[in-house]
Image: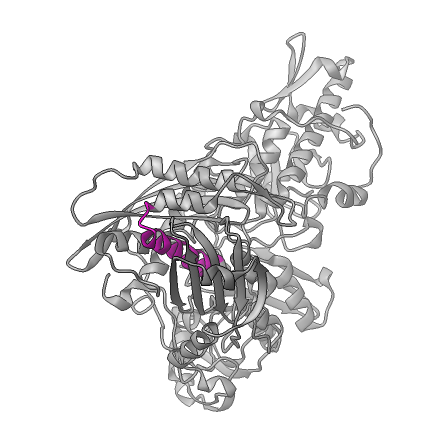
Amino acid sequence: MSTIKNISRRTFVKSIGLASGGLILACNTSVFSDKEITKNLVDFNPNLFVQLNSDGSLVLIASRSEMGNGVRTSLTSIIADEMEADWNKVIVKQATGDAKYGDQNTDGSRSVRYLYETMRKMGAMAKAMLISAAAKKWQVSESECTAKNHFVTHSSGKKIGFGDLVEIAKTLEIPEEYVLKSPKDFKYIGKKLRSIDAEDYVKGKVIFGLDKRLPNMKFVAIARCPVTFGSVKSFDKSEALKIAGVEAVIEIPRVEKPFGALGGVAVIASNTWAAFKGKEALKIEWNFGDNKSYNSKTYMAEITANVHKQGKVAKDVGNINKAFKNASKIVESTFQLPHLSHAPMEVPNAVAWVQGDSCEVWAPTQAPQTTRKEVVDYLKTSEEKVTINVTFLGGGFGRKSKPDYVVEAVMLSKELNAPVQVVWTREDDIKHDYYHTVSAQYLKASLDKNGNVTGWLHRFALPSIVSTFSPGVDYAAGFEIASASNVPFDIKNMKIEVGKAPAMVRIGWLRSVINIPHGFSENVFADELASAANKDPLEFRLNLIGKDRVEDTQNEIKYNTARLKNVLKIAAKNAEWGKQLPENHAYGLAVHYSFYSYVASIVEVSVIDKKVKVHNVFTAIDCGTVINKDTVKAQMEGSAIFGMSLAFYGKITAKDGAIEQSNYDNYKMIRMHEIPKVHVEIVESSEKPTGVGEPGVPVIAPAIVNAIFKATRKRYHNLPLSDYGLV
């Protein structure tokens, strides 16, 4: 904390705020006003993102979306820690969608990873200015002053509150240099910090998208073609108009963009229920289009055939043919996994109010800037005339990164010249999702006489997410190949191939994305190889990962096999791997590296009367520096439940182009009585923070399947397990 330099706010935004991929905290009241907070107060905005008021209240603005991920607490606590702020004086406000905050997409398990260093710098900068203000007030050296718990203290013992320094601090220039805390001095980072929103959750004060109301707002339900990208041929609205509360019925066109509206027939009403009932009463004749031929069974047979023949080579190391020729034993298996739906508790919804060439939106969105761009493009207006207000999200899992439902609300608000709320039903949500990809995979491996793996072939076919952005793409993209080609096994001869798989529905990212199919096949197949080698699965897996090494994945964070083995050993230790379990009980294991984090799970199942029950999940995670231990633990618990739902029930199918599932009765979720005990250990680490929200998912399904094999000697390569009558 030495050099003082006059840096304009615009320069600061460029040089500091965007340095780590995005801006996160706070904004001054000229942009985000709250009369109850700022009334009669003097405020101090050292970098446009931290607002300290003269009463000591500290307003920090979170740029990422809160959907049960604890992000508003985790992100803002970093700056509060560096600033030496009292957490009880912190008020968190939500950022609107705006490029000045940098990357605001709450996906990819990257919020903390992208923004950790930037937020630390912001807190340290604000603290440095408060220390300077105190030194100036007391006419002493800055070196004699320290900040702690919302006060600056002089070496003589006198101290002054942060709020009392606002008048002086706001006159100071922004420091170019500042000192970051030593991790040993953290008081919030790495601790179990109380959620900033917990009390409002409990009291029902939190506003989700569905809660938003505006005066004279219209409520809308939309009938969309059962077949993806189909269109309206004709419709009869007479019965719908007879329903009390229904005011109008209009057709809306398809907006042919990746996140544009599907189009259909909109029912406008004075309340949601009337809109829903009006939609049910519509009589519509559809043009189904090319996708009417889509049938899941036929399609699965086609892509399975494609993985049983040579595909596009994505990786070729050593000599796989020679390894297979010289093998003592060959093992080969085929895996088939269905489409999955996000099915968050809160269905897609949005409120929009278009007034002339301006628009304001209130929506549960994971991607406010993407949403803003879609609205700007549709209205052919400018960014400054579009405001995207982010509400709390009742779950997202990637679905709410795609703002098609917001575009629908904007279209209708413009058409009706009134504020509009579009609400999807659960049936709309499941039948018109951006689905997690369906996949077929073929794996073949060779073992030598000692049971060591000498060759590994992995061939897969799945419709790519890229097809949503570039129709016609029918091979997996590079990022979808990576989790197969970067498999963390020490095998000399390896080949990865990709088969053809055209997309028939909208494909989108779902919690842990490509790691779901690849994490499943790699972990189940590795367990299968252990059985073929007649070796303990834990010992076999550790040997398969091989010697400790750091691999260059051409990313900022290098892949470390020692960390991967460590989480597997910790999970095994906590589960007491190898101990005698009750009759019909067994352990299964899985370990996976994704989103730069290392996760292993040991799952205990019982199989009694051909029914599977999961009793315990022992998970270990190494995600580098931990911001909030409670959040990490909660994410691992949620991942276990999410992964169990996929393993037991997750299956979306199509017949004659239409999705067959419609609600939680035929797209089931794990229920309370099925939830196991989830034991979580977080590895202490000083490495850079890495992902948490997604990497706990891929290990659950394969660990369950491996445990079932141990208990029954039956191996399941396809999901969900409900197809086999096991649940």
Horizontal side, residue 172 vs residue 528: left or right: right
Nearer to us in this view, 462 or 467? 462
Question: What range of the chain is rendered magenta?
Answer: 515-536
Quadrant of the drawing holding the C terminus: bottom left
Instruction: Pick whichever, 485 or 585, lies toward us.
Output: 485
Position above or below: 361 against 30 = below
Q: Is residue 39 above or below residue 441?
A: above
Query: Residue 516 magenta-drawn?
Result: yes
Q: In the displayed structure, does residue 308 sit left or right of residue 263?
A: left
Q: Quadrant of residue 184?
A: top right
Q: Between 199 and 644, which is closer to the camera in this rendering?
A: 644
In the rendered image, is residue 607 in sight? Answer: yes
Magenta span: chief secondary structure = helix
Residue occupying the far right of the picture: 6
Of residue 140 and residue 211, the one placed in the foreground of this image is 140
Task: Tell me what residue is drawn at x 65 percent, y 11 percent.
Answer: 158
Q: Would residue 245 be visible to someone looking at this image?
A: no
Q: Position of residue 428 (x, y in %)?
A: 43, 72
